[in-house]
C-alpha cells in the first residue's frame, strides 16, 4: 500500500511551550488513523501542520507525496478538513454553503452542482438543501461540514473531534458515514478524538498522544492486548492497603486511581475468588469489584497514569497558569 501521509520528527513550539514534540508516523492510503488524547495534547496542532495552517518548527511531513512546507497549495488541493469549531455560514442554505465552497476550489458550475447533489444525498440532507443552516441541529451541521469537505474530492480528509458535543445516537450515525467513506471511496481519514469508543470503533490504527509526544501507536486490539490481560477494578475505602496486597507475580500491573485499585492479570475469572479471599482475610471492606476485558481507557491509564478526563482537567489548569504567568 502507498503511504498517504508521512511524518518524521515533526515538532511545533510556541515560545517555551512545546505543543508537538518530535513525532513520527505514516498513514496508508484508505486507512482511518486516530490521534487519541486529551485536550491540549497536541492533536489539533498536528492537524494544523499537516493541513498547512501552521508551519512546523522542525521535522518534515508530506501528504500524498507533497511536502507541507514546500507546496502548500498542492497539499490544500489534496485534503478536506472538518474543523472542531463550526465554520459554516449560518445565514446561507445547505446548498449555498456547498456552492460557495466549490467556487473557492474553482470547481466548474455543472460539476459543482452534480457533486453537491450527490454529497447532500450521501449525508441525507437532500430534503433540507434549501433550508438555512441556523435551523439545523448539531448533527445535521456536522454532516453538512463533512459533505462540504468532500466536495473537491480530496484524497485525505482531516476530522478534528468530528462528534464533539453530539448526542450518542447522532454520534453513531456519523461514525457510520465515516466508516463508509473510507471503505467505498478509499479516502484516507485522520481524526482527532478524546472519545475512547470512537477511536476503538473507527480507527485501523491509533496513536496515543500526550504532552505533544506519541506514547503508543498500534491497532486498537494490539494496544489493548499490550497491557497484559484482564482488568479487575476494586473499590474500597482502604484502596492503598488493597494495592499493597497485590504486588505478586500473577498480577502484572497495579494502579490506584480515585479510590479504586485496578489490577491487570491473566485469567481474571479464575483468580477473582483468590482476590476476594485475600481481601476478606485482611478484613478489608469491598464496596464493589468488577472484571472486564481491557479498553482503550485502560490503555491510556496504563501509559499515562491518569484517565483522559483527568488529563483534560490538568491541562486546562496548566494553561490557566501559563496565561497568568504571561500577564505578569
Image (tube, grey):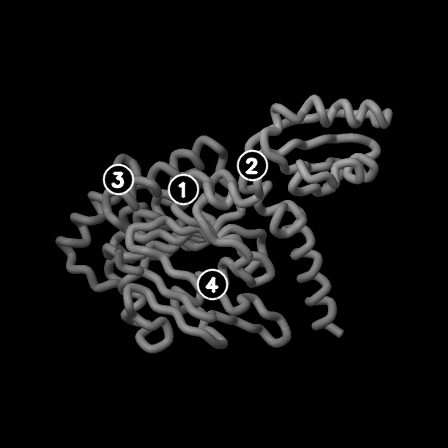
Q: How many badges with numbers are in the image?
A: 4
Query: Mark 4, residues whose alpha carbon is within 10 Å: few (<14), some, or many (≥20)?
Result: many
Between disc 1 and disc 2, the foreground one is 2
On the question of residue 89 being in view, the answer is no
Residue at x-position 66% and y-position 42%? 253
Q: Secondary structure at mark 3?
A: helix
**As displayed, is residue 147 above or below residue 320?**
above
Nearer-N-terminus badge (4/3): 4
Nearer-N-terminus badge (1/2): 1
Residue annotated with mark 4: 46
Q: CA distance from mark 1 to mark 3?
A: 19 Å
Residue at x-position 50% and y-position 71%? 11
Side of 7 where 209 appears, left or right: right
Evaluate if marks 1 and 4 touch, with contact meaning CB atoms under 8 Å apart.
Answer: no
Nearer-N-terminus badge (2/4): 4
Comparing 165 with 28, the one in front is: 28
Query: Mark 3, residues whose alpha carbon is within 10 Å: few (<14), some, or many (≥20)?
Result: some
Residue annotated with mark 2: 294
Q: CA distance from mark 2 to mark 4?
A: 28 Å
Asked where in the image residue 59 lies, by quadrant, the reply is bottom left
Residue annotated with mark 3: 122
Q: CA distance from mark 4 to mark 3?
A: 29 Å
Tag of residue 316: none
Amino acid at each position: 500500500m502507498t503511504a498517504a501521509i508521512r511524518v518524521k520528527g515533526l515538532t511545533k513550539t510556541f515560545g517555551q511551550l512545546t505543543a508537538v514534540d518530535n513525532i513520527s508516523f505514516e498513514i496508508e492510503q484508505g486507512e482511518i488513523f486516530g490521534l487519541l488524547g486529551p485536550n491540549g495534547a497536541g492533536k489539533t496542532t498536528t492537524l494544523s501542520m499537516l493541513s498547512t495552517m501552521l508551519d512546523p518548527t522542525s521535522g518534515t511531513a508530506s501528504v500524498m507525496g507533497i511536502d507541507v512546507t514546500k507546496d502548500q497549495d498542492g497539499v490544500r488541493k489534496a485534503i478536506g478538513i472538518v474543523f472542531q469549531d463550526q465554520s459554516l455560514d449560518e445565514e446561507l442554505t445547505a446548498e449555498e454553503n456547498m456552492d460557495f465552497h466549490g467556487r473557492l476550489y474553482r470547481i466548474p458550475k455543472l460539476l459543482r452542482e452534480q457533486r453537491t447533489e450527490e454529497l447532500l444525498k450521501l449525508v441525507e440532507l437532500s430534503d433540507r438543501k434549501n433550508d438555512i443552516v441556523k435551523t439545523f441541529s448539531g448533527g445535521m451541521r456536522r454532516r453538512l461540514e463533512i459533505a462540504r469537505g468532500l466536495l473537491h474530492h480530496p484524497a485525505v480528509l482531516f476530522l478534528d473531534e468530528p462528534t464533539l458535543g453530539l448526542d450518542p445516537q447522532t454520534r453513531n450515525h456519523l461514525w457510520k458515514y465515516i466508516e463508509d467513506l473510507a471503505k467505498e471511496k478509499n479516502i484516507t481519514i485522520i481524526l482527532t478524538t478524546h472519545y475512547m469508543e470512537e477511536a476503538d470503533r473507527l480507527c485501523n490504527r491509533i496513536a496515543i498522544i500526550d504532552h505533544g509526544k506519541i506514547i503508543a501507536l498500534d491497532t486498537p486490539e494490539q494496544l489493548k492486548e499490550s497491557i497484559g490481560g484482564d482488568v479487575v477494578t476494586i473499590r474500597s475505602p482502604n484502596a492503598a492497603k488493597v494495592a499493597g496486597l497485590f504486588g505478586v507475580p500473577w498480577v502484572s500491573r497495579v494502579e490506584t486511581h480515585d479510590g479504586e485499585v485496578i489490577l491487570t492479570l491473566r485469567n481474571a475469572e479464575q483468580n477473582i475468588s483468590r482476590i476476594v479471599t485475600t481481601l476478606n482475610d485482611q478484613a478489608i471492606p469491598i464496596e464493589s469489584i468488577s472484571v472486564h476485558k481491557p479498553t482503550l481507557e485502560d490503555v491510556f491509564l496504563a501509559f499515562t497514569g491518569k484517565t483522559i478526563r483527568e488529563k483534560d482537567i490538568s491541562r486546562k489548569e496548566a494553561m490557566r497558569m501559563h496565561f497568568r504567568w504571561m500577564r505578569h
